[in-house]
């Protein structure tokens, strides 16, 4: 993988030291410097990018400052990746080097292949080592890692396995790894036979799949509270109510150190990750509406809040969309990955907290957080293309997921659903929500009424626009609930990711 000659490369230990020592301004400057360097390198040595700039009449020699860089046209799947052959998108002669291919899920269009070299796995190992070091159960204790991400052409399982393996060898951590993927039977077997022999167990997987494992564990004779469990999630946003639910069900005592959600992609690997302080800030914001509105635009939705390392990747925000610049076998410069959100420096966030008389260091001490890395933040919302509409309003999956954690529903439904906007005989719109029942559970009329009421009330509480709409159209705003048996192939075929919307 090509790298600009003026970009200093750091060892893992040096990066760990920088994280603890360097302040906010260093990370902002480093991200901008490396983005500009990557732009110039790609403009010279990547055939597709050279042609793209020529077509858009961009002279690379005139791009000298950060403001200049922000004028460079964005690339995306449609205007760039699908316009050039794979070989032209890579660095010159990249195909002569060993690489690993993975594919996008295809949930937002035709799947695309991406390739990566060892560097991306190594970068991801830094994040995974940070998670290992933050354990509330001790750093050097025997640890079992169960990789519950799909192990096929998708990136989640492969990069998680490689990252933990690299971190374990590099740091001498006593890690054992098993890769059952999405095979529940093998995960339960590992939890029963292997996990009790270890001081702690990390389960890595998509949040709805992990919830299945937790909810079905009692029937399998597994007591999570005896296993000292930690969780590493990715690919799905989730609410703090979900985090609390997971913690209560499994006996997690420190949600800040023992749960982590990774923001990653097949496009360029591990991009950002939750930290102890990002989780804290999000939870503080949820208690203070004015702070929440100040931190996050589009404040009707709850975002994932993570930090990113500008030594490896940089983000910027343009018109509510996040753009990334990062190096891989296919370098990406000002790449619109399709996610909505924003970027804040550590200093930006600290100033906003101070405005509401919140001392971050003091709040961190209250919950036992000792180290605060001053990396920049990125916040990401549920994708618009993963939402459905009702009378022109966007209905996001996060609203429904929140409702299904209600105590009167969790014993009967798994939390998975598929929603769709439909029309009745009079051509009035309505929201149809298909819910997955837990195994051997039935759906009496009382459950249907409870689900309709709870989802409707949650939508009204989550969206002022929906509240206004429901006041106007009355019962037509109430969702139609349909229950399905567990793992029914129409909506809930076992797989790596649940499709929350049906187009």
Image (cartoon, grey):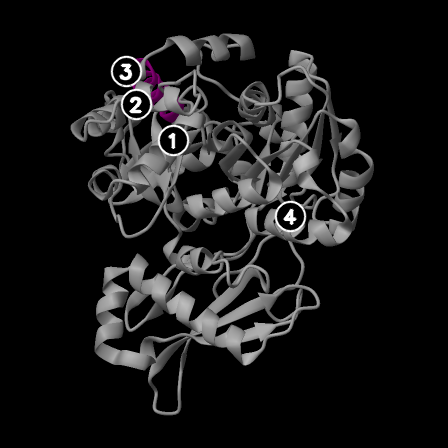
| 59 vs 147, nearest the viewer | 147
Task: Give the answer, above or below, for where 407 lies relative to 13.
Answer: below
* Residue at the spot of label 3: 25
Instruction: Please name the residue shown 74% across and 38% down the image.
Output: 179
Label 1 sits on residue: 280
Label 2: how many Cα within 10 Å (few below 14, some 14–19, many 20+): some
Which SS class for mark 1? Answer: helix
Sequence-wise, the earlier of marks 3 and 2 is: 3
* Picture quadrant where residue 74 is located: top left
Instruction: Report the front residue among 336 and 349.
Output: 349
Mark 1 near mark 2, Cβ–Cβ under 8 Å? Answer: yes
Q: Image quadrant of residue 8?
A: top left
Q: How many residues crowd mark 1 within 10 Å: few (<14), some (14–19), many (20+)?
A: some
For the residues labelled 4 and 3, the Cα–Cα distance comes to 42 Å
Secondary structure beneath disc 2? helix
Q: Give the range drawn in magenta.
A: 25-39
Q: Is residue 29 magenta?
A: yes
Q: Which of marks 4 and 3 is nearer the N terminus?
A: 3
In whole angstroms, how far apart are the C-alphas of marks 2 and 4?
A: 33 Å
Q: Position of residue 27 (x, y in %)?
A: 34, 17
Residue, far bottom:
425
Question: What secondary structure is found at the residue carrying circle 4?
Answer: helix
- Marks 1 & 3, CB-CB < 8 Å contact: no
């Amino acid at each position: 993988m090509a790298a600009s000659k003026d970009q200093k490369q750091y060892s893992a230990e040096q990066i760990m030291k920088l994280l603890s020592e360097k302040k906010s301004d260093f990370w902002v400057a480093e991200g901008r410097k490396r983005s500009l360097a990557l732009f110039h390198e790609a403009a010279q040595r990547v055939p597709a990018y050279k042609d793209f700039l020529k077509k858009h009449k961009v002279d690379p020699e005139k791009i000298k400052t950060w403001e200049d860089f922000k004028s460079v046209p964005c690339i995306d799947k449609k205007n760039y990746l699908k316009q050039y052959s794979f070989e032209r998108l890579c660095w010159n002669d990249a195909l002569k080097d060993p690489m690993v291919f993975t594919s996008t899920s295809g949930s937002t269009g035709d799947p695309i292949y991406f390739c990566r070299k060892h560097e991306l796995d190594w970068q991801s190992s830094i994040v995974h080592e940070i998670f290992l070091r933050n354990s509330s159960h001790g750093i050097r204790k025997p640890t079992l890692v169960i990789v519950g991400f799909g192990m096929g052409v998708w990136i989640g399982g492969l990069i998680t396995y490689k990252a933990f393996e690299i971190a374990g060898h590099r740091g001498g951590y006593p890690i054992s790894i098993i890769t059952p993927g999405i095979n529940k039977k093998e995960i339960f077997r590992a939890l029963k036979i292997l996990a009790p022999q270890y001081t702690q167990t990390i389960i890595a997987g998509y949040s709805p799949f992990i919830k299945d494992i937790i909810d079905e564990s009692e029937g399998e004779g597994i007591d999570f509270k005896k296993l000292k469990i930690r969780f590493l999630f990715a690919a799905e946003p989730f609410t703090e109510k979900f985090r609390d639910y997971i913690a209560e069900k499994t006996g997690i005592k420190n949600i800040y150190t023992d749960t982590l959600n990774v923001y990653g992609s097949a496009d360029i690997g591990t991009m950002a990750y939750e930290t102890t302080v990002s989780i804290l800030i999000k939870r503080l914001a949820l208690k203070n509406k004015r702070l929440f509105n100040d931190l996050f635009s589009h404040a009707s939705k709850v975002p994932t809040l993570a930090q990113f390392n500008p030594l490896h990747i940089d983000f910027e925000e343009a018109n509510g969309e996040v753009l990334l610049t990062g190096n891989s076998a296919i370098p990406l410069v000002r790449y619109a990955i399709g996610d909505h959100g924003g970027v804040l420096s550590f200093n930006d966030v600290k100033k906003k907290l101070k405005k509401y008389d919140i001392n971050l260091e003091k709040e961190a001490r209250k919950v036992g957080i000792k180290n605060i890395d001053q990396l920049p933040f990125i916040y990401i919302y549920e994708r618009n293309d993963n939402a459905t509409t009702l009378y022109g309003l966007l209905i996001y999956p996060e609203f429904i997921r929140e409702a299904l954690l209600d105590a009167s529903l969790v014993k009967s439904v798994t939390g998975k659903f598929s929603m769709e906007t439909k029309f009745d005989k009079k051509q009035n719109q309505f929201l149809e929500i298909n819910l997955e029942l837990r195994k051997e559970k039935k759906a009496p009329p009382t459950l249907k009424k409870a689900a309709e009421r709870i989802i409707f009330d949650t939508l009204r509480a989550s969206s002022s626009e929906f509240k206004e709409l429901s006041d106007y159209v009355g019962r037509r705003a109430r969702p139609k609930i349909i229950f399905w048996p567990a793992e029914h192939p129409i909506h809930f075929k076992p797989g790596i990711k649940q499709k929350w919307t049906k187009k």
